Image (cartoon, coloured by chain):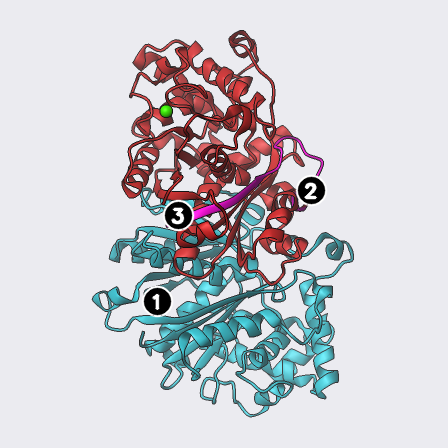
Chain colours: A red, B cyan
Amino acid sequence: MVAIIDANLTRFGKRKESLLELAGEVSLPLIEKYEIDFVVVSNTYSGEFNFQSGINNLITTYLSIDNVPSIRVDNTSGSGGSAILVAKSLLDSKVANTVLVLGVEKMSEKNTKQVTSIIASLLPLEERKAGLTLPSLAGLMAKEYMRRYNAPREAFALVAVKNHYNGSLNPYAHIQKVVSLEDVLKAPIIADPLTLYEFTPISDGASALVMVKDEYAYSFTKKPVFIKGIGVSSDTSYLSGREDILSIKSVRNAGLIAKKMAKIDRIDFAELHDMATVLEIVEAEELGLLRKGEGWKAYYDNYTSIDGEMPINTSGGLNSKGHPIGASGVAQAVEAFLQIRNEAGNRQVKNARVGLSLSMAGFGNSATVIIYGDEP
Amino acid sequence: MVAIIDANLTRFGKRKESLLELAGEVSLPLIEKYEIDFVVVSNTYSGEFNFQSGINNLITTYLSIDNVPSIRVDNTSGSGGSAILVAKSLLDSKVANTVLVLGVEKMSEKNTKQVTSIIASLLPLEERKAGLTLPSLAGLMAKEYMRRYNAPREAFALVAVKNHYNGSLNPYAHIQKVVSLEDVLKAPIIADPLTLYEFTPISDGASALVMVKDEYAYSFTKKPVFIKGIGVSSDTSYLSGREDILSIKSVRNAGLIAKKMAKIDRIDFAELHDMATVLEIVEAEELGLLRKGEGWKAYYDNYTSIDGEMPINTSGGLNSKGHPIGASGVAQAVEAFLQIRNEAGNRQVKNARVGLSLSMAGFGNSATVIIYGDEP
Ligand SMILES: [Ca+2]
């Protein structure tokens, strides 16, 4: 398998820096320290947001590492997980020995309406024409969750309260502000019943990992973080084509594959894809982190808080840390890296030895689950 | 290593079919025959040309193989080579057993001016502002080649004559029309001295390969085509930043790596990146297929023709077959597959046992050289 030997993050948020400058902010300190021989760029929308193509080559030129081969890997919101999978494969097949995985997205060059329209371009044409959007489906999912499991509407809001609290402890988070349950409930409704604070903001940002084969990891650092398992699975792109709106098959399957590969049951913390609050609960249930249909209860007794039994989104998650598309999945791995190395500061989980991340595209048309550990 | 067990191509050209339909045309016959467990989509501009993102997921949904994981790999004009590299790595690392590599691009939804502007978005911002384009650099390259090597202007035109002739024998080529030396010379100048017939047209198209580990290849087909070597190398994105306009370092290096891996000197035919005629000559020199500074002479004695000593671009090349960006590099592998299996019809090279392809981004900011053979 492979290991992460170093990692880096920009602050997420509305940044004045260009896409190339954000890429440089995370990459330059790493290329000074390591002899990178391949760069995998996780980015989806450099063309649509920034009118730049061939971004992987522009980045290596910007970094003055023109001689280092690079590619761009895209899987929309799940690009980060896919880029890590590709980096692992490049290492396994000896194409490269030291891979820089660089996630980057600069969204704020477009306004909210433009961003929404660009992101909706990942839906099948019929659904776009019908006006379906990812947020609207999240609203439907929340309603059905409440109906089927007799869950109170507040449960979703409590996800936002927790994640904003966690984000307030993360110097790299977009929104570093605590919100109360009342704040969340009173905010403008985006997709009934979910409000503004229950969706991820539009963010710029970059994230980076240096990955090597695990047998070399200790020659670079005393505290490598090992990728113990990685599972990838896929489902329909049609929002309306799902058998059950409360089931995300790809997430469940990817989790099972990753856990089997990791040969481990213990999970000490997880970074999930909380594009909307309800998704965190449903994903945690699919991954077996919370009990099916009862996940919402965990948010009433701090079970998923940093000092709870199963901390979820200690980074603040997409909800508060932000979701610069290509940077997001890679940033989850950065959080796992920090937690397992005991370097997560105020938001450190005690005895965090095994972590899980879920990088997801759309509503699960692709899912990559990665399990990280402090030993191979 | 790995092998190609099947391959498919659409006719290139201005196609009325959508991007998804083109993808289906090459993929559906293959997914009926093989149990594909990963799809690597080679595509650069689905957002810019077609306003669709997450194209890999939209494609697997369109093909009704929603459960098969997929990613998009992009490296602009060199995407095909990168996608094959990633597929090989996924096979080596046992992420997948049977990979569909699908190249696809639908360019004709935009007009020529828009396409030119979109493709120029791969250049560094300063050079775009200065009005530099890939064709203009090809013109400069041609002039410098003539000056330094005392080569006649006709030599480049003869590349177009040969490639159009080859294209006329290829039922999948965009331009299936023979042109004379006079036709080429009299055509409108695009970048002095090079004329319209010396540049690749704007094409739609798709191409596909099924790849497996070489040890399984013979269980699928009696005539697998093996990837014996694959080399990737990189150079600056600045057109103006090259040490020598007649040197493409990345091509030379990628060729050396691939040949070393393949442990072979013999090359029976080559598919090169002839975005402009002059590039075919310079690339062939960098790859050692033609002698440095004397490559142009080969075009006066049919040396590079289908029945010559070193056939180049038997498919018609980008020049005549067309260059649907993401489909192009994968289509080179399709040509190698057909030639080595002795299935190239009218354009069959005699005793074609070892082939080479060069998939290149920009003016060599990335280059992937692949060597194919009839044995592992
Ligand atoms: Ca615990």
Label 3, residues with CA under 10 Å away: few <14, some 14-19, many ≥20: many
Name the foreground residue: B280 vs A274. A274
The disc label shown at residue B70, or none? 3
Residue ranking furthest to the bottom: B301
Relative to A4, does residue B240 appear above or below in the rendering?
A: below
Residue carrying label 2: A18
Disc 3 within 8 angstroms of ligand 1 (CB): no
Q: CA distance from mark 1 to mark 3?
A: 21 Å
Label 2 packing within 10 angstroms: few (<14), some (14-19), many (20+):
some
- The tag earlier along the polypeptide, 1 or 3, is 1
Q: Amino acid at mark 1?
A: Met
Q: Which residues are magenta?
A: A1-20
Q: Are marks 2 and 1 on the same chain?
A: no
Going 57% across and 35% down the picture, which residue do you hit?
A324
* Residue A245 in which image quadrant: top left
Could you say which disc has been placed on residue B1 in the image? Answer: 1
Q: Are marks 1 and 3 in contact (CB under 8 Å)?
A: no
Q: Which residue is rendered at x = 48% and y = 36% of the image?
A: A341
Residue type at mark 2 is Ser
